[in-house]
């Protein structure tokens, strides 16, 4: 039996998007009502699910899948997670505490509940 966590407790808000923000990337708050790309070791606020014109719909809660950096892969369970770069996440001691629910070692992605 397969399970699905898609749609669980999703919450999405619209922010002004800085240049370079694209759908699927983790983003951070960069100013009043504004999000931008993350850099190494940044704590992200959510995932840009849609970007149009100068605005981004950002998922702040619920289940998401993201690619992870092979150098510091996450483990199942609660742990600190930060950005490895502007598209991948990594396990990080001082990162945001997130529940990792599943890991795909072939695709190098993991599921998490924000």
Image: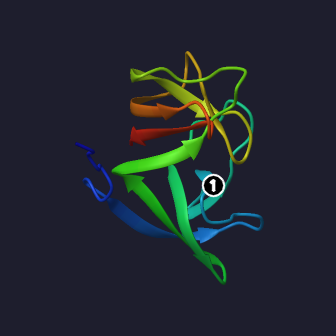
Q: Is residue 2 above or below residue 50?
A: above
Residue lying at 59% horizontally and 63% vertically, measured from the top left: 34
Figure check: 69 above or below 75 = below
- Circle 1: is it few (<14), some (14-19), or many (20+) Cα within 10 Å? many
Instruction: Tell me the residue at 63%/35% (across/down).
Output: 68
Residue 50 or 36: which is nearer the viewer?
50
Residue at horizontal 68%, vertical 30%? 41
Q: Is residue 86 left or right of residue 28?
A: right
Asked if residue 49 lies left or right of residue 77, the reply is right
Residue ID for mark 1: 25
Q: Quadrant of the N terminus?
A: top left
The x and y percentages for residue 45 are: 50, 47
Is residue 33 in view? no
- Residue 22 appears at what percent x and percent y? 68, 65
* 37 displayed left or right of 77: right
Q: How is the image coloured?
A: rainbow
Residue 53 placed where, x, y %?
A: 66, 84
Secondary structure of residue under mark 1: loop
Q: Which quarter of the picture shows residue 42? A: top right
Which residue occupies the extreme bottom position in the image? 53
> In terms of depth relative to the viewer, which is nearer, 4 or 91?
4
């Amino acid at each position: 039996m397969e399970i699905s966590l898609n749609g669980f407790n999703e919450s999405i808000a619209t922010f002004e998007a800085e240049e370079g923000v694209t759908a699927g990337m983790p983003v951070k708050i960069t100013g009043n009502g504004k999000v931008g790309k993350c850099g190494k070791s940044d704590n992200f606020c959510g995932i840009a699910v849609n970007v149009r014109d100068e605005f981004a719909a950002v998922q702040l809660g619920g289940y998401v899948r993201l690619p992870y950096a092979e150098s510091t892969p996450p483990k199942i369970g609660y742990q600190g997670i930060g950005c490895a770069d502007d598209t991948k996440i990594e396990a990080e001691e001082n990162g945001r505490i997130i529940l990792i629910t599943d890991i795909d070692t072939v695709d190098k992605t993991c599921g998490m509940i924000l």
